[in-house]
């Protein structure tokens, strides 16, 4: 029988990690990271990675395994996730993929198109143009040559804009056209639990989360990250809170203003996440939890018996 994997998805601060931990303990699971920023070891607090205590309760995979200097990719993550899923299955454990990255889940379940290597010259050109003219201007240039790809990118998304330019220059075909080619889906059965709490509760959770991050050492993490002198275009530098706390550490804004901006940016991101989840299929079987839940085994049994029955009935 085709093996089963469970997806626990939802917007930032919706309680995915806590729910995944409870489910992993109940159903003998291994939690596999599906968050682009939690792969970096330098930002445990600011990316809300599972604590060492949580990691000791059940097996976790793909958390804090890459250095800040490494630019990860969805293709790399998919291969790594599939390998960890195989390992968990062979050990008799349920793979539980937890995160808020819709694109990660889509490539995992549906497959990823095989895009030819654009070559070092195209990569160097994309990086150079990004630094010289900025993401918005490069996005405008991309729209002239590859409007199909450009229409799906935000003008501020420097990493994806540079990647799209690189692919178009190096292969002569736009990234969107390559992505539309037939991909090989994963040989797994997927089910999903989607957390979709009310917006007011999510905003309150974002505020609590930021306060907890400050208490847990987020400022010190950003100070250490800044000391590395990294390229500002690296993915880790776009983690929510890095820019704002760096500006505070430079004396440019107050800590209160940094917190206000982080809450605003995070809130805007959760809206985009919610929009993606509403319009894309996570898996063949999806159970949506719209109300806020405090996750514990007893509370799940008392308040969300349908959630547990949903998982128990999938095998």
Image (spheres, grey):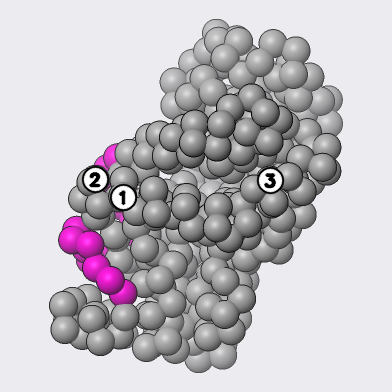
**Residue 200: x %, y % from top left:** 23, 46
Magenta residues (range): 275-295
Q: Are marks 2 and 1 in contact (CB under 8 Å)?
A: no
Q: Nearer the viewer, residue 169 or 254?
A: 254
> N-terminal of the two: label 3 or label 1?
1
Q: Nearer the viewer, residue 11 or 227?
A: 227
Residue located 32% across and 66% down the image: 192
Of the two numbered discs 2 and 1 in the rendering, the one whose residue sits closer to the viewer:
1
Residue 293 is covered by the magenta coloring: yes
Of the two numbered discs 2 and 3 in the rendering, the one whose residue sits closer to the viewer:
3
**Residue receiving disc 2:** 199
Work out how far the residue at label 2 is from the one at label 1, CA to CA, in angstroms. 9 Å
Residue located 27% across and 42% down the image: 279
Could you classify mark 2 by the number of other residues whose Cα lies within 10 Å: few (under 14), some (14-19), or many (20 or more)? few
**Residue 285: x %, y % from top left:** 26, 66
Q: Quadrant of residue 304 in the image? A: bottom left
Badge 3 marks a residue whose secondary structure is helix
Residue 31 is covered by the magenta coloring: no
**In the depicted structure, whether residue 166 falls above or below residue 1:** above
**Residue 260: x %, y % from top left:** 44, 35
Residue located 31% across and 46% down the image: 203
> N-terminal of the two: label 2 or label 3?
2
**Residue receiving disc 1:** 204
Work out how far the residue at label 3 is from the one at label 1, CA to CA, in angstroms. 23 Å
Could you classify mark 1 by the number of other residues whose Cα lies within 10 Å: few (under 14), some (14-19), or many (20 or more)? few
Left or right, 212 with reference to 286: right
**Residue receiving disc 3:** 222
Badge 2 marks a residue whose secondary structure is helix
The quarter in which the C terminus is drawn is bottom left
Q: Quadrant of residue 26 in the image? A: bottom left
């Amino acid at each position: 029988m085709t093996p089963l994997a469970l997806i626990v998805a939802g917007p930032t601060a919706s309680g995915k990690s806590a729910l995944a931990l409870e489910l992993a303990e109940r159903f003998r699971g291994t939690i596999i990271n599906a968050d682009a920023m939690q792969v970096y070891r330098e930002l445990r607090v600011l990316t809300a990675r599972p604590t060492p205590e949580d990691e000791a309760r059940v097996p976790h995979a793909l958390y804090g395994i890459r250095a800040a200097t490494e630019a990860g990719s969805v293709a790399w993550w998919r291969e790594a996730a599939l390998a960890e899923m195989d390992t968990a299955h062979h050990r008799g454990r349920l793979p539980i993929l937890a995160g808020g990255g819709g694109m990660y889940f889509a490539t995992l379940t549906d497959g990823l198109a095989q895009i030819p290597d654009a070559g070092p010259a195209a990569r160097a050109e994309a990086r150079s143009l990004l630094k010289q003219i900025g993401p918005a201007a490069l996005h405008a240039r991309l729209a002239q040559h590859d409007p199909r790809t450009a229409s799906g990118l935000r003008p501020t998304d420097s990493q994806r804009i540079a990647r799209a330019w690189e692919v178009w220059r190096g292969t002569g075909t736009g990234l969107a056209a390559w992505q539309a080619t037939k991909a090989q889906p994963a040989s797994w059965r997927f089910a999903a639990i989607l957390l979709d709490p009310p917006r007011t509760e999510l905003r309150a959770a974002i505020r609590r989360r930021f306060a907890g991050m400050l208490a847990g050492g987020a400022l010190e993490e950003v100070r250490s990250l800044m000391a590395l002198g990294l390229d500002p275009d690296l993915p880790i530098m776009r983690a929510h809170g890095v820019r704002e706390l760096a500006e505070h550490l430079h004396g440019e804004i107050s800590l209160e203003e940094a917190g206000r901006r982080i809450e605003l940016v995070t809130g805007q991101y959760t809206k985009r996440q919610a929009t993606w989840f509403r319009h894309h299929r996570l898996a063949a079987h999806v159970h949506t939890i719209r109300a806020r839940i405090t996750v514990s085994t007893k509370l799940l049994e008392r308040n969300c018996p349908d959630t547990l029955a949903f998982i128990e009935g999938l095998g």
